[in-house]
Image (spheres, rainbow, N blue to C red):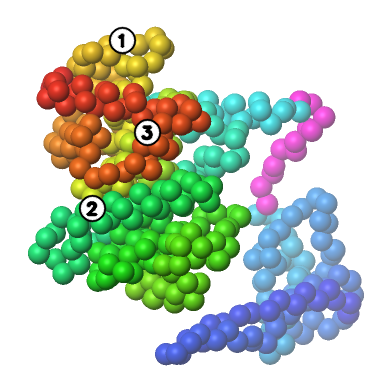
Amino acid sequence: MSEIIITQQQNTLDSTDDDRIFKLQAPITIAITTASSENYSDCDSTSTTPTPLDLKKDSVSIDDLIINTDKKQSKVYLTPESIKNCNSKLKSVEPVNFSTNKKRSFEECANDSDEVCIKKSKSLKENWDDLDLKESLDIKMVVEYSNDIFNYLYQREVETIPTLNYLTAIDSEYYIKPAMRAVLVDWLIEVHEKFNLTTETLLLAINIMDRFLSTNKVTMSKLQLLAVTSLFMAAKFEEVKLPKLADYSYITDGAATQDEIKIAEMYMLSSLNFQISSSNPLNFLNRILKTDKYNSKLAHMGTFILEHSICCHKFVDIKPSTLAALSMFLAKHIFYSTSNQSSNIKASVVSKEDTKRIWNETVKHYSGDIDILNDTKFQELSKELIEEIAFPTTDLSSLVIKYKQSSREAVFFDVLYWCRDRSADEFKGLFD
């Protein structure tokens, strides 16, 4: 008897208290007889000479082949009766005529899928536009994963903000004066500019420093060491081309040696349980910016307001997504009131209708469903941020110089004057 032997390994999982060990069991052998009528003792006694399986005509699954099993030898034989039973189960499938099918481009197929998705999204929610679908052909935007990514970021941001605002909790053992932190943050901005690091690195460095200070007491003499080590850790996480360790030590003018930075890094990592990554507020800001087609001047305005809010001691324990929404809300008001683009928003007067137009249902969706006109906490934070920009309580001269530059379209002046006008008007018409 000639046989085709198919060997298949079986895995089992043995669990113990300490670990789990995979053990390989004896192989299962499937034998399919192809010709010969000798020795069918293991098969059905009524079996006749096996006929070959026509793979071109018929197709069967392995489950259909397992008809008769020899437990001792772990063999399965295919008999004529089993083939007949398999054939009776097969369903006729119409062949595809490839010669008559017209080849279609990738863009045509993508457009078809977009139309289906757009119709589906519109039927579910008519009020906002699905802007992700318009970027479906841009592989860098990973549109198919964007919702999952931001759901994770919304969950993660709660876990990676300071446990308390150590700058306003005067009774806390970790309290330090806001002016001291302002000096540190302003120095970090200056160093960050000299090293040509990304904005994400600066925001992560401030986040690491704030999280550490909210749970640890640091003497005044070690605050600069803490700040430079936070930037050192953030750059490792965010940057591709890193400054050398010696550069960090040199920039402190001898206040922190290389060994001290390494020791501080290890201690900070242990204190933070190695939780370095956080929901960077720039991710949320860019998502809202999508509703204005990533306008560059609007992006600079939003980033300046965002950095100002993060540098301000009053917003240390506010979620990054809320800070991003606050920044874009003010930036959109300022941008449309000062730009020459066609808009119904006047520079001198702000009304509730302007707010509705600026923060429509699409913007609301991409901000994480923040309802500005009905969210009283958001309104209070907006007014507080406007006052802080118009009349800052802490000196952030490096940040001001940074956004006075022409490379950032000198957005500082537009933001400052608008905030002072709104403060003088007592926020009239902004929300009511």
Distance in Å between CA atoms under marks 3 and 2 = 24 Å
Q: Secondary structure at mark 3?
A: helix
The prevailing secondary structure element of the residues shown in magenta is loop
Identify the amino acid type marked 3. Answer: Gly
Placement of 268 over or under 89, stated as above or below: below
Any part of residue 414 in sight: yes
Q: Position of residue 223 (x, y in %)?
A: 32, 65
Where is residue 60? Give x, y as percent: 71, 58
- Is-magenta flag for residue 100? yes
Tally of numbered discs: 3
- Tell me which label, 1 or 3, sits earlier in the chain: 3
Please state the horizontal and vertical placement of residue 367, each as a whole percent of the image: 33, 37
Give residue 302's mark.
Answer: 3
Quarter of the figure with the C terminus: top left
Depth-wise, is mark 3 or mark 2 nearer the camera?
A: 2
Which circle marks residue 179 in the picture? 2
In front of the other: 40 or 109? 109
| Above or below: residue 284 compared with residue 244 | above
Label pair 2/1, CB-CB below 8 angstroms? no
Residue 93 lies in magenta, yes or no? yes
Q: Residue at x 46, y 52 (%)?
A: 191
Q: Which residues make up the magenta segment?
A: 90-102
Amino acid on which the number 2 mark rests in the picture: Ala
Residue in the image at 89% along x and 71% along y: 35
Q: Residues within 10 Å of mark 3 (few under 14, many from 20)?
A: many
Q: Mark 1 against mark 3, which lies toward the viewer?
A: 3
> Could you say which is closer to the camera, residue 295 or residue 172?
172
Q: Would you say 271 lies left or right of 193 here?
A: left
Which residue was labeled with disc 1? 344
- Judged from the image, the secondary structure of the residue bearing numbered disc 2 is helix
